[in-house]
Amino acid sequence: MGFYEITSILLILLIVISIIIGTNVRRTFKKYNTYSAASGITATHAVRIILERAGVNNVMIKPCRGSLTDHYDPRDNTVYLSETVINSHSVASIGIAAHEAGHAIQYAKNYAPVKTRGAMVPIVNFSSKASMIFIIAAIIFESAVYSQTMLIIGIVFYSVYTVFTVVTLPVEINASKRAKSLLTETGALTADENVLASKVLNAAALTYVASMAVSILQLLRFIGLLSRRR
Ligand SMILES: [Zn+2]
């Protein structure tokens, strides 16, 4: 069994693990979404007091559709909270909302990794599509003389996506770190409640670790495909 086969098997295993991690996020959120915070505040209110405490102004809070679709959009400087989170008093929802506020603070404070990640977004969208086109073409036209070149170009494009998943990780961990300390500082959550909110945030952070691991392994697998052909 060669390098390509080994990475292929590991990739399948890792994808299964990723699915379990994803299910765990929903399960953990559901569990701690039944615990109301003693402060009695909503997730929206938590975002406001956190941003105020951090000295960050002019951030808007708007609703967005879906479940666990909460995000911060730097283009309109808005924290988008999902329907289940926005008016919730639960420690899970407050934790998630605080994490998104953490992203808003990262932009306001010019946190370097978030700037790098933000600048990469348009390039990543293009390069991940391009990588698939080149790699699939290289597989279909395997016997063509330019097949190897297409594969190399595909791998280069794919590596941009891999770098993106690596840069995403510190951004996500840092947003949760900011959220946790500000939730305690503002009294939005008690120390005990913060532990529960952290469980939700840590479960979510694992999904980013999984995405990074999948993309690194996929990149290695493509490199394995290249070396097998030589
Ligand atoms: Zn995040």
Image (cartoon, rainbow, N blue to C red):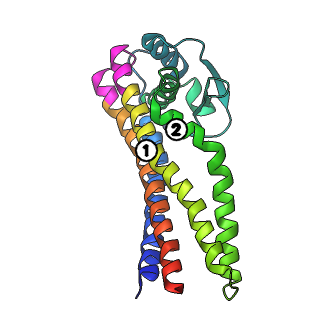
Residue 132 position, x and y percent, is: 66, 66
**How would you rate the neighbour count of disc 2 (Cα within 10 Å): few for under 14, some for 14-19, many for 20 or more?**
some
Give the magenta-colored segment's residue range.
Answer: 180-194
Identify the residue at image location x=45%, y=62%. Answer: 216
Residue 46 position, x and y percent, is: 48, 18
User: Is residue 163 shown to the viewer in this render?
Assistant: yes
**How would you rate the neighbour count of disc 1 (Cα within 10 Å): few for under 14, some for 14-19, many for 20 or more?**
some
Identify the residue at image location x=38%, y=13%. Answer: 186
Dot 1 amino acid type: Leu
Give the residue number, with chain letter if any, for mark 2: 116
Q: Answer yes or no: do the residues labelled 2 and 1 have beta carbons within 8 Å?
A: no
User: Is residue 16 shown to the viewer in this render?
Assistant: no
| Image position of 28 (left or right of 48) | left
- Looking at the rendering, which quadrant does residue 204 occupy? top left
Identify the residue at image location x=50%, y=29%. Answer: 103
Magenta region, main secondary structure: helix
Q: Decide whether residue 9 is among the magenta residues.
A: no
Q: Nearer the viewer, residue 173 or 67?
A: 173
Please state which of the two labelled residues, at mark 2 or mark 1, is closer to the viewer: 2
Quadrant of the image containing the N terminus: bottom left
| Image position of 169 (left or right of 191) | right
Task: Point out the tag, 2 or 1, that comes first from the N-terminus.
Answer: 2
Q: Nearer the viewer, residue 146 or 101?
A: 146
Give the residue number, with chain letter if any, for mark 1: 169
Q: Could you tell me how far apart the alpha carbons at marks 2 and 1 are, in whole angstroms?
A: 12 Å
Number of numbered markers:
2
Dot 2 amino acid type: Thr
- Give the secondary structure at mark 1: helix
Residue 130 position, x and y percent, is: 68, 61
Q: Which mark is residue 140?
A: none
